[in-house]
Image (cartoon, grey):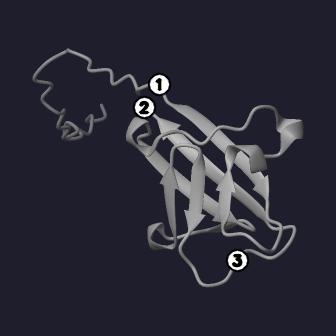
Amino acid sequence: MEKKQRLPKPYLILPDVPSTEIYVHIPKKMMVIEYFAIADGITNIFTEKDGVKELGNQKILDPSKVSYMNLFINAVLQPKENYEVKKGMICLKTEDVPICGATVILQMFIV
C-alpha cells in the first residue's frame, strides 16, 4: 500500500477588516463660465462688449464671486501677475499687447 504524502497547509494571512462601513465622497458641483474675445493688436483692456458675439452674451464675473480663474492668450496660460480681472473687465499688465487675431479666453470656476 502506498503512503500518502502530506503537504503542508498553505499559509494565508487575511487582512483584518475593522469595519464594514463604506465612505462615499461626493464631489462638489462646479460651474465653469468662459469669456471669449479676439485681440485687435492695439488694446490691453478687454470688456464684456469685446466678447465674441456669435457665442452669446459674454460675461466677466466679479472675482470675489469666483472660486478660481485662468486666462489664456493664444492658447498660452498667463501667470496671475500679467493680468487683473474686475467685474466686466480684463486688464493686461504687460508692456506688449496680444497680436491681432489672438484669442483671449478667461475661464471662471464657481464651486
Q: Nearer the viewer, residue 80 or 15?
A: 80
Q: Nearer the viewer, residue 85 or 9?
A: 85
Q: Nearer the viewer, residue 72 or 1?
A: 72
Instruction: Name the residue at 65% across, 62% down.
Output: 45
Q: Evaluate if marks 1 and 2 touch, with contact meaning CB atoms under 8 Å apart.
A: yes
Badge nearest the viewer, 3 or 1? 3
| Residue 38 on image: x %, y % | 81, 59
Amino acid type, mark 3: Val
The residues tagged by marks 3 and 1 sit, at their Cα atoms, a distance apart of 36 Å
Quickly name the residue at label 2: 111
Q: Secondary structure at mark 3?
A: loop
The residues tagged by marks 2 and 3 sit, at their Cα atoms, a distance apart of 32 Å
Quickly name the residue at label 3: 97
- In this rendering, is residue 51 above or below 55? below
| Residue 25 on image: x %, y % | 33, 25
Image quadrant containing the C terminus = top left
Amino acid type, mark 1: Lys
Q: Secondary structure at mark 2?
A: loop
Residue 29: mark: 1
Q: Secondary structure at mark 1?
A: loop
Q: Evaluate if marks 3 and 1 touch, with contact meaning CB atoms under 8 Å apart.
A: no
Residue furthest top in the image: 21
Instruction: Name the residue at 81% across, 32% down.
Output: 56
The residues tagged by marks 1 and 2 sit, at their Cα atoms, a distance apart of 6 Å
Sequence-earlier tag: 2 or 3:
3
Instruction: Name the residue at 60% across, 84% down.
Output: 95
Sequence-earlier tag: 1 or 2:
1
Q: Viewed as shown, does residue 109 lie left or right of 101?
A: left
Instruction: Name the residue at 38% across, 41% down.
Output: 64
